[in-house]
């Protein structure tokens, strides 16, 4: 198969042509495990993001959704109470390595094409983009409070970078010229409308990689909206909210994006049981232009080609890193992007078990959707910790072998902390890396890689003391 170029749309085109001979992933079977949809496959191909779509800038203007319209506001955001998984992931998992940001344009159909600087023409393939969010993820350490499954929370504000390229302002309808108003839908979900699934790699069949998306059977392939959403916001886009595309000699050179912010006011669920997925939150973005493209029309040409019929385009800022796979092995911390493309809309499937949404983790280069989520919780632990280390708990518990679990604990002061796993005979079977933790609630991830079924002890060791808790591997 020829080398993949020009982002995701060409990736899906190759899949549609069933040229799988160079894929690193392939389907094996569909199985059920612990109530999760799980399939085994080998690794998927990577992709190249066009350099033209990486040339972006973000303005200081934030648009707040109010009464189905966008109101511009200039304000200094305080991110101390915000959760931003992509930035936390860069600093924690990637140790400061930066993901590459780019514009991804969304279309309700696979009609509109882009012509790139080398003359290559490729269809835009993503119809829905979104993210599943989990504040229990220990990746947030030192960035925000790591919540537990006992902490329901309300998402007060959601923010991300949007790009609205407006090339037509009026269209003739019934013999009259009317103003063009494009529409964006943002849908919000808690666990009542979220499906949690998993897949395994051929090269590592003992490990299940997790993901979360909106419910598969609630998606309308006609409207691209999901009836399982807790709430749907409608953005009406006029020329007042258009961003600029910088042109040079008739060629697009860079894009200006603005931060969009909405007020979801969606509350997660909580549980007193061992299930670590009930506090998930997700949102999705769908764009419905008033004037839709015909099959084969060109949206933009980066090589100077003449665009004969112009269209308005809407996109969001995404991110990726060449050759990097995001691995989610714990059901207790699921943070992943998801998309839908032309295959799933028209009844085809990718990897068989992914029928309406594709998690960003199945790609050779994981896709991320940088977004800011501000939340509040009414019952973050406020108990008076009189000394040192306390409140040690492990979840999920029981946990599958060859997975991971989070050890949550409270500190009265900052301290270096590590978690030591021992069997019932006191033999050390694994030790986590030492982590500098803050005063308050913290979490450390421990691996069950290679552990047989049975009961183990997890001991949190710090300068402020040590405390143990049982862990069951099944």
Image (tube, rainbow, N blue to C red):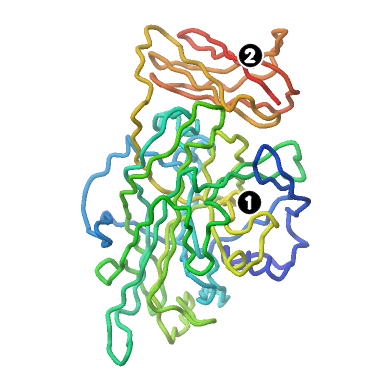
Closer to the camera, 246 or 470? 470
- On screen, residue 375 versus residue 225, left or right, reads left
Task: Name the spot of residue 433 as percent of width and height, x first.
Answer: 58, 22
Q: Residue at x 54, y 40 (%)?
A: 334
Q: Residue at x 78, y 51 (%)?
A: 28
Residue that label 1 marks: 362
- Picture layout, residue 426 above or below residue 33: above
Q: Residues within 10 Å of mark 1 (few under 14, many from 20)?
A: many
Quadrant assignment for the C terminus: top right
Q: Give the image quarter of residue 380.
A: top left
Closer to the camera, 29 or 442? 29
- On screen, residue 230 versus residue 461, left or right, reads left
Q: Which of the two discs, 1 and 2, labels the residue nearer the N terminus?
A: 1
Q: Residue at x 57, y 64 (%)?
A: 341
Task: Name the spot of residue 52 as percent of width and height, x first.
Answer: 47, 66
Q: Residues within 10 Å of mark 2 (few under 14, many from 20)?
A: many
Q: Does the CB distance between marks 1 and 2 fall below 8 Å?
A: no
Quadrant assignment for the N terminus: bottom right
Under circle 1, the secondary element is helix
Residue that label 2 marks: 457
């Amino acid at each position: 198969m020829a080398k993949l170029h020009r982002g995701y749309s060409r990736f899906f085109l190759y899949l549609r042509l069933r040229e799988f001979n160079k894929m690193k992933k392939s389907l094996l079977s569909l199985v059920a495990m612990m109530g999760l949809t799980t399939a085994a496959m080998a690794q998927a191909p990577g992709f190249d993001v066009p350099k033209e779509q990486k040339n972006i800038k973000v303005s200081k203007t934030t648009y707040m959704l109010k009464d189905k319209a966008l109101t511009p506001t200039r304000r200094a955001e305080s991110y101390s109470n915000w959760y931003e998984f992509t930035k936390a992931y860069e600093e924690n998992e990637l140790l400061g390595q930066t993901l590459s940001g780019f514009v991804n344009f969304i279309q309700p159909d696979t009609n509109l094409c882009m012509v790139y600087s080398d003359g290559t023409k490729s269809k835009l393939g993503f119809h829905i983009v979104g993210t599943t969010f989990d504040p229990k993820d220990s990746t947030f350490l030192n960035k925000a409070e790591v919540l537990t499954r006992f902490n329901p929370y309300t998402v007060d504000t959601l923010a991300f970078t949007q790009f609205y390229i407006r090339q037509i302002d009026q269209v003739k309808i019934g013999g009259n010229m009317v103003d063009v108003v494009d529409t964006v839908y943002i849908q919000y979900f808690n666990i009542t409308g979220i499906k949690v699934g998993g897949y395994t790699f051929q090269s590592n069949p003992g490990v299940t990689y997790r993901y979360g998306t909106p419910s598969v059977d609630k998606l309308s392939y006609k409207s691209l909206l999901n009836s399982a959403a807790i709430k749907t916001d409608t953005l009406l886009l006029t020329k007042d909210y258009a961003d600029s595309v910088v042109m040079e000699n008739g060629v697009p050179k860079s894009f200006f994006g603005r931060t969009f912010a909405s007020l979801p006011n969606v509350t997660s669920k909580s549980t007193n049981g061992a299930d670590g997925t009930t506090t998930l939150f997700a949102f999705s973005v769908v764009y419905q232009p008033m004037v839709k493209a015909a099959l084969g029309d060109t949206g933009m040409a980066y090589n100077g080609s003449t665009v004969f019929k112009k269209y308005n385009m809407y996109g969001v800022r995404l991110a990726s890193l060449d050759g990097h796979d995001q691995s989610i092995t714990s059901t207790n911390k699921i943070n992943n992007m998801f998309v839908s493309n032309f295959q799933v809309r028209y009844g085809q499937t990718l990897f068989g078990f992914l029928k309406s949404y594709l998690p960003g983790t199945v790609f050779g280069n994981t896709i991320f959707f940088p977004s800011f989520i501000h939340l509040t919780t009414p019952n973050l632990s406020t108990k008076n910790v009189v000394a040192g280390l306390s409140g040690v708990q492990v979840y999920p518990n029981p946990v599958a072998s060859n997975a991971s679990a989070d050890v949550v604990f409270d500190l009265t002061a900052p301290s270096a902390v590590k978690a030591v796993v021992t069997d019932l005979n006191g033999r050390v079977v694994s030790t986590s890396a030492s982590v500098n933790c803050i005063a308050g609630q913290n979490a450390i991830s421990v691996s069950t890689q290679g552990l047989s079924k049975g009961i183990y002890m997890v001991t949190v060791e710090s300068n402020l003391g040590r405390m143990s808790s049982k862990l069951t591997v099944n």
